[in-house]
Amino acid sequence: MRAVLDIVLIVLDLYVWLLIASAILSWLIAFNVVNTRNQFVAAVSEFLYRITEPALRPIRSFIPSLGGLDISPIIVILIIMFIQRVISYYIYPNVV
């Protein structure tokens, strides 16, 4: 059972990195640093959008618009960190 919890923690950690990569890529696209006409950039952008958008969309519906600032990735990362702490401190030690 601990192996399953370890896998869950690794997947959550990987998802945090995907959220960070998605946010950085969106900034790079917004400031015209990378060109979305490049097939590789378009494929990576589409992949990150499809992976992160289902978690970000419900958060965006609750948060009011802050102009051009999107803090939904930060909130999702904080939620994931909370889940990781609960698993590490409360669930993991009690599993045999």
Image (cartoon, grey):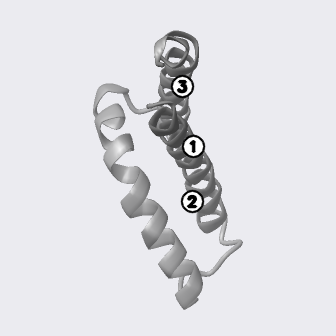
> Disc 3 or 2, which lies upstream in sequence?
2
The structure residue drawn at horizontal position 52% and vertical position 19%, both measured from the top left corner, is: 92
> Disc 3 or 1, which lies upstream in sequence?
1
Determine the secondary structure under disc 2.
helix
Q: Are marks 2 and 1 in contact (CB under 8 Å)?
A: no
Residue 43, image x, y percentages? 49, 80
Amino acid carrying label 2: it is Ser
Of 28 and 14, nearer the camera is 14
Of 61 and 17, nearer the camera is 17
Residue 70, image x, y percentages? 50, 39
Q: Residue furthest front?
A: 96
Q: Are marks 3 and 1 in contact (CB under 8 Å)?
A: no
Amino acid carrying label 3: it is Gln
Q: Reply above or below: 31 against 18.
A: below
**Residue labelled with disc 1:** 10
Disc ID at residue 66: none
**Residue labelled with disc 3:** 84
What is the C-alpha distance between the residues marked 3 and 1?
10 Å
**Residue labelled with disc 2:** 26
Residue 37, image x, y percentages? 53, 88
Determine the secondary structure under disc 1.
helix
Amino acid carrying label 1: it is Ile
Name the quarter where the N terminus is drawn.
top left
- Crowdedness near tag 2: few (<14), some (14–19) or many (≥20) residues, C-alpha within 10 Å: some
What is the C-alpha distance between the residues marked 3 and 2?
26 Å
Q: Reply above or below: 17 against 50.
A: above
What is the C-alpha distance between the residues marked 2 and 1?
24 Å
